[in-house]
Image (tube, grey):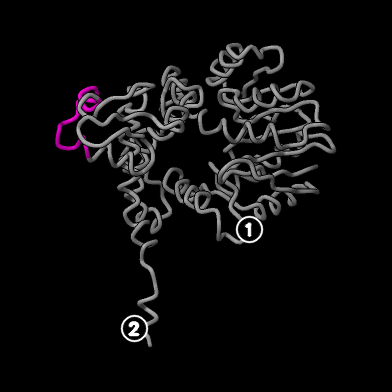
Amino acid sequence: MLWCMNALLDPSQILQTAFAFWNSKVLLTAVEMGLFTKLGRRRLTGTELGNELSLHSRGIKDFFDALVAMKFLGRDGDGPNALYFNTPEGAMYLDEKSPRYIGGILTMLNVRLFKYWHDLPEALRTGQPQNEVKYGEKGIFEALYEDPVKLEIFLNAMTGLSRLNFEAFAAKFDFSKFKTLCDIGGATGLLCMEVAKGHPHVQCVTWDLPVVEPIARKNIADAGLSGRVSTSSGNFFTDPLPKADLITMGMILHDWNLENKLHLIRAAYEALPAGGALVAIENIIDDARRENVFGLLMSLNMLIEFGEAFDFSGADFRQWCSQVGFKRFEVIHLAGPCSAAVAYK
């Protein structure tokens, strides 16, 4: 009887997950090599594309055809004369020339996080970060803040992934009762720009560290939104937050431990008027902690990156915000695993 029951169990999910790093490394390597950008709108044979990427002949067919089988490349025909081309998704999201490029975060995954996740067992046993600091180097943000050129490249590279969530927020949230918005940790100003484009009655300010402000100001001017979106700067652990009807924090709270999370929530409460709202845009974990796999994995990533930092559920957010005085709450799904957790004063 036990043998019969065991014969009905399927190990495919176990094996698929165990070998998933193979798929991941193939895609991340293709992005790092600039494969999708070099291909562009062209159709090339494997030999032609391999030569442009300086690949050895041994791996060309396997590498490109694996990408075809995973639906990241298209291919016309079979054999040595077959032509490879970008899928619509590849052209939109993986070609650096596309305004919706998301390869920046994929490059960071490949260059940084892939090797640091190897030390997940140590992170789980010690609770300590496994990033550059572990090896006596400066943390990623500390190093970036010392180099404005690299900082701008990094922030612009990260906008691709955020754009999907911020566009959804601008489309789904009810802005009718709010006249002013301040985005805390606003980086390039993307969230404010998306809201400003869709809601002309909302005056927006993007607020970040002084070293970041010129980058945001430049991007806002390039978008022709200088009259609608302004910039300001400060440190949210030492300075009061700007007053606004609506305060947003996009991927900010998960960077910190509970004490610092509560500090930021309290600072937002103090800056809001009655009827104002705090919005945390994050990979909000479902309250039962059973469904949002990406949100749970992101929380493990915060362990690897920062140690005590962690992602959270809507119920967690509600509990913390209640402690400082917020009265009403909701969670609005945005895109993929991301949601907006909203607390109303």
Q: Farthest front residue?
A: 77
In the figure, 89 relative to 258: above or below? above
**Which label is found at residue 287?**
1
SS assignment at label 2: helix
Q: Is residue 26 left or right of residue 106?
A: left
SS assignment at label 1: loop
| Percent of width and height locating residue 330 | 73, 48
Q: Is residue 178 left or right of residue 229?
A: right
Nearest the viewer among 111 and 133 is 111
List the residue tagged with mark 2: 3
Q: Farthest bottom residue?
A: 1
Residue 51 magenta: yes
The residue that appears at 32% across and 39% down in the rendered structure is 67
Disc 2 marks a residue whose amino acid type is Trp
Q: Quadrant of residue 142?
A: top left
Which quadrant does the C terminus fall into?
top right
| Percent of width and height locating residue 113 | 37, 41
| Percent of width and height locating residue 324 | 74, 47
In the figure, 130 relative to 8: above or below? above
Nearest the viewer among 110 and 68 is 68
In the figure, 154 relative to 273: above or below? above
The residue that appears at 84% across and 38% down in the rendered structure is 275
Instruction: Tell me the magenta residue range.
Output: 49-61
